[in-house]
Amino acid sequence: MSQMISGRIAGGIFALAATALLVLGALGGLLMEAAGNWNGATAAFDAYLLRVAQFTLWQALLSTLLSVVPAIFVARALARHPSFPGRAFILRLFALPLALPAVVVALGVLALYGRAGYFAGLLTLAVGERWQGIYGLSGILVAHVFFNLPLATRLFLGALESVPSGQWRLAAQLGMNARASFRFIEWPVLRSAIPGVAGLVFMLCATSFAIVLMLGGGPRATTLEVAIYQALRFDFDPARAVSLTLVQVLLTAAIVVFLGRLGASMTGDASLPLAPNRRIWRNGGETLANIVLVLLALAFVAGPMLAIVAGGLQADLVRLAGERSVRAAALTSLILSASAALLCVILSFALVAGRRALELRRGNMPAGPAERFMDSGVAMVLVVPPVVIGAGWFILLQNAGDVFTFAPLMVVTVNAVMAMPFAVRAIRPAYDAASARHEKLCLSLGVTGWNRLRLVDWPSLRRPGATALAFAMALSFGDLGVIALFGSENVQTLPYLLLSRMSSYRTADAAGLALMLAILCLVLMMAAERLGRARA
Amino acid sequence: MRKDHKGTSGAAIRLDNVRFTYPGGPPMIFDLSVGPGTIVAIMGPSGSGKSTMLNLIAGFEPPSSGRILIADADVTALPPAKRPVSMVFQENNLFAHLTTAANVGLGRSPSLKLSEEDRQDITQAIARTGLAGKEMRLPHELSGGERQRVALARVLVRERPVLLLDEAFASLGPALRDEMLDLLAELHAERGMTVLMATHDPADADRVAEIIAFIDEGRVAAVGLAKDFLSGYGPDAFARYVGERHANRDPALARKRT
């Protein structure tokens, strides 16, 4: 009996150790490099680094403001119109940006607002001179708002939907107008949600890599992560990479600690009722303002998506699909992301089972450190962005031969670990519930080991496991982080190929690849959502 | 808004063939006539339509046809705030982040723009409901009974001739519930408003109501004097609903707590 519990604990500890090895190994590599080349590392703390760090925070702050403030009013407009044709569609559309790979979004933004974008003519007229395209800070902001405005809107709407229907009725009976009901009903709820939402958006923007890589440009619009990438790939200046990475880790750690104080959820998204049963009494002026607001947000979010589709369809998709390099990249992407997803789910399952086993063993005693690490330690990997882990191992492995031969290993392991917080969130509730129901029964019947996995755990974990698998695979499939560092002629994924077509100005090819990537990721995400919903 | 609140008096209520259907639910038809200043207990099984009828009168649900008249005026098309009605729910009657005084004050002005006279009325209403000294408390610092007292204090400053109670005291313990009913009876004696209260408990009806309206399967199945219904002279369906224990010719048992 204690044997089956200790088996699970061992599995959990192994998963924890493997995760820790990946993350801490990277940090160790960086510190060793710093210690070995102390002068170089300290010399890299210069004006450039300061400027890059400043820009990182500045663009994250602006992105957060531009996403969160409008989102408050869009969410309020949606909450005050609980039913109108197309509402459910808008909410589903607002869930899409999160599922799109950042490379694809960057391309969509360029296709719309770029020098040769669909809006270039219009913008030239508006500005009065030839439109130069949206690069640098403005491009980064547009892309970040595209991602985070819908996310923040959904989170705020989730908060507003938590207002009991009695309160809306009360407001109606007391005759509150839009202003009064904002002040007494909506604002108090929104105010308590703002720190968490703003914190999450800030974190996402401060660690965003692909957007800045493709839309930022030159030393004036570079964030720490992109600077790390440039230091390793172009300047080959490990000392600078080390100092940049350490600053990045300290920065994100500070943000995460701050967020923890605010009670923000790092993996959060709202699950929204599509047609809440509630009536709200409005006047015509407010209704008009709300319609305008929702339509503007809709246009802003739908624009880049339409541009991705339109641009992709203009590309010669048939020729692209026939190209050897495209096929090879697609196959590589599939194999690597499937392996990463599988590894992710196995590690997550081991952690979840190990945590539960430790909880069972201790009874009413307080939780030990191992259990607490398995509990909340997973979220810690979010402190260390993929590019940072990649950079650490890149520096460590350069002593061990050709760095680029490690590409598949690095992509699979780093992407697996990055998706773990999400996978654990999908698997754990189901596992813990199943364990609470079956644990005693399994003990009394002596169902253990493989039999237990097959007969007891598998049926209840099949669905959440598949959700986690699809989600992790989508995340890994669209990721341009580790592969940007380790990619080469020999190992290319689709995002990497897209990036290299972009840098050789084959824009039509890039647009076609973006459409393929977008469709594949959306299919995976939809599968994840469908599997997750059927369970609930 | 009337300022001579000593004189607030009740208004007659009439539901004239009021039809309503929830999506996928059976059709409901309500016909009811209540004289001004009466206290009516609305009784009936769960899901029979008690709350729906109150929501229709308050204006939270729109009838598909029929008319709702209050004091002989057709209010069917009016939004909730324009109807001469106050309603108290079982819970969520208060805004969690506002003090007692502010929650009551919303009954006078939905944007809390209050005159000196308004403030005096509010203080009086709070004192009248037994909450003197708790003006600055937040809802979570009050007991369940006290929270419902705040809601009643707001009813007082709103001065509407109709009061709807949707199982307003159902989550309180028996002693507290009797206290609240007695307070309700006192306020009714002072103001004379028409009260419709949905309740499950015959003892509630027995304590304060003159009339019982029995709702069954989306219809007003029977209306009669409370003392008749509760002593077994009501319709059979009502007797089955309250159970033999209460309905069986033993008024002493039902009245024991009075």
Image: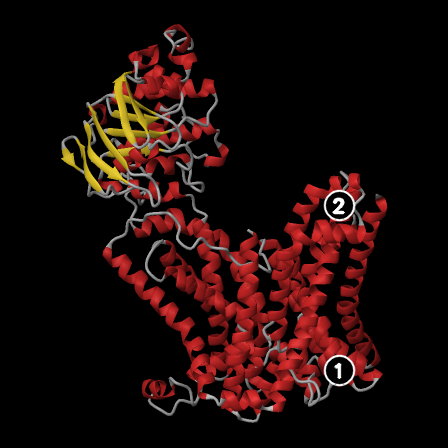
Vertically, is A426 above or below A296?
above
* CA–CA distance in space, label 2 to label 1: 44 Å
Identify the residue at image location x=62%, y=59%. A258
Q: Amino acid at mark 2?
A: Glu
Q: Quickly name the residue at label 2.
A: A359
Task: Determine the secondary structure under disc 1.
Answer: helix
Q: Position of residue B119 (x, y in %)?
A: 31, 34
Q: Quickly name the residue at label 1.
A: A239
Q: Label 2: few (<14), some or many (≥20) within 10 Å?
A: some
Residue A367 visible: no
- Apparent side of residue A260 relative to residue B133 in the rendered image (left or right): right
Q: Position of residue A4 (x, y in %)?
A: 82, 48
Q: Label 1: few (<14), some or many (≥20) within 10 Å?
A: many
Q: Nearer the viewer, mark 2 or mark 1?
A: 2
Vertically, is A169 above or below B40?
below
Residue B246 visible: yes
Q: Amino acid at mark 1?
A: Ala
| The one of B8 and A423 positioned closer to us in this rendering | A423
Task: Determine the secondary structure under disc 2.
Answer: helix
| The one of A338 and A245 positioned closer to us in this rendering | A338
